Amino acid sequence: MITIKSGLRGRQILRCLSSPAQTVPDYSHAVIGAGVVGLAVSAELSKVPGNRVLLIEKNSDFGMETSSRNSEVIHAGLYYPVNSLKTRLCLEGSQIIYNELDSYKTGVEWSKCGKWVVAQTDADDSYLETMYLKAKQELGLPVEMLPSNKTQWVEPAITVRRSVLNSPTSGIIDSHSLMTYLSTVFDNNDGDLAVGSKVVDLEYQDKKGYLLSCQDTVNESQDTASILVENIVNTAGLHAHHIANMLLPADRQVKQFYAKGNYYYLKGSGFPPVRRLVYPVPPRNGKSLGTHLTIDLQGSIRFGPDLNYVDNLDDYTVNSANIPRAYEAITTYYPHIQPSDLQPAYSGIRPKLAGPHDRSFKDFYIKEEPGFPGFVNLLGIESPGLTASIAIGRYVKLLYHGSR
């Protein structure tokens, strides 16, 4: 038995899904994985007249993995190649948040607090100059460069030895309020959410569509239920490559890597306040944006994430052994703390297409797989996936419905 929950209205239907012999699809689209991107894709597809969308989630509720374990930053689109999907969808996604998601009307809580990227050395300064020119001239972003003698009057708690790139269109967002909003949109368009349902097999049945086999993870039943759908969207996040490889032939099998990041709160009170996000110049390895300072909607400060490649997806324990390294990184720009002031907060794991020794840029992988009509794969959806989530949803909808 698979539990179908129709959004926030609380209606639950326990039923067996289709039998393998069924020839008429139960749904037009099945979206696998109910993180923020899966919710956004489902919400957008559900807006198209005639679509009947099922969102399948193996956990007991939506958004329980990467979507709820991140920095909750609204990125401006500074870091990625100009013509990449990451840049395009980040720019579009941030505009959607600021222009369409009025907090009073939608319940989505966000703040356009701005961000500083801080240069402490000559090499950092050169990096920021390049970033500034790209952002200003190629992306049209309202960035500005501030010398160190001016920054002390704006954010006196932040140490700046050379310069700052000021990004006023960066911000913060409550990811849970965004996911609740997207779930409500999906529910209002009569979408179905199947929680506690793990996809264990996929089969392409040519003109009939795709047969999905699911197991109930809540009751730990070994029984499987089958469902026939016309199209599949793979938004399974950390598990997306496993879903993809159920269908793809051996010579097209894909792989994701797992990057764990730890976050830390300040323990105690009396620390100098900061009014915006503060990032160092990214490490040269291109794997992360560095251990940065973020604030939440109440103004509380937290730091992170660091980065460690892992194999275990079940271990979200914050690694206290990383505190000395985090302290060293943080005090280059926020020198008001001791290692004992850093309290383990939470950790998150993000899917990457680049392994530990691969320094090449990896864009979002979002495309319909050749030979599998209607099967759209999303791989490597890491940062800026939260910012870009609704834009990703609209991009996927265009793959199916063109200009609709």
Image: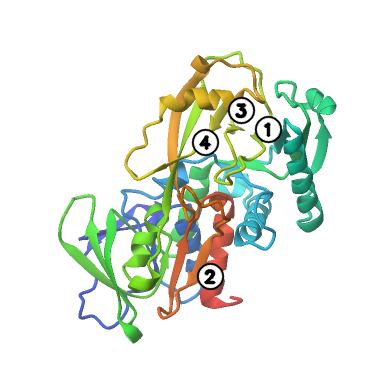
Name the residue rendered at 43%, 80% in the picture: 373
Q: CA distance from mark 3 to mark 2?
A: 36 Å
Residue type pointed to by label 4: Pro
Residue 329 position within the rendered picture, expressed as x and y whole percent measured from the top left: 59, 28
| Dot 4 or dot 3, earlier in sequence | 3
Query: Mark 3 vs mark 1: which is more N-terminal?
Result: 1
Residue at numbered disc 2: 397
Label located before the other in sequence (4 or 2): 4
Q: Quadrant of residue 183?
A: bottom left
Mark 3 surroundings: few (<14), some (14-19) or many (≥20) residues within 10 A: few
Q: Secondary structure at mark 2?
A: helix
- Mark 4–mark 2 CB contact (< 8 Å): no
Q: Please state the horizontal and vertical placement of residue 278, each as a whole percent of the image.
A: 66, 33
Verify CB contact (< 8 Å) between mark 4 and mark 3.
Answer: no
Q: Distance from label 1 to label 2 (Cα)? A: 34 Å
Residues under labels 4 and 2: Cα distance? 32 Å
Q: Nearer the viewer, mark 4 or mark 3?
A: 4
Q: Indicate whether 323 appears above or below 170.
A: above
Residue 360: image location, x then y, percent: 57, 55
The residue under label 2 is which amino acid type? Lys
Chain-order first, disc 3 or disc 2: 3
Q: Which residue is mark 4?
A: 305
Reading the image, the residue beneath label 1 is 276
Q: Mark 3 — residue?
A: 299
Q: Is residue 272 left or right of residue 148?
A: left
Would you say the residues marked 3 and 1 are in contact, meaning their CB atoms lie under 8 Å apart? no
Residue depicted at 58% across the width and 44% down the height? 285
- Residue 236: assigned label: none
Q: CA distance from mark 1 to mark 4?
A: 17 Å
Q: Earlier in the sequence, mark 1 or mark 4?
A: 1
| Residue 16 shows in the view | no
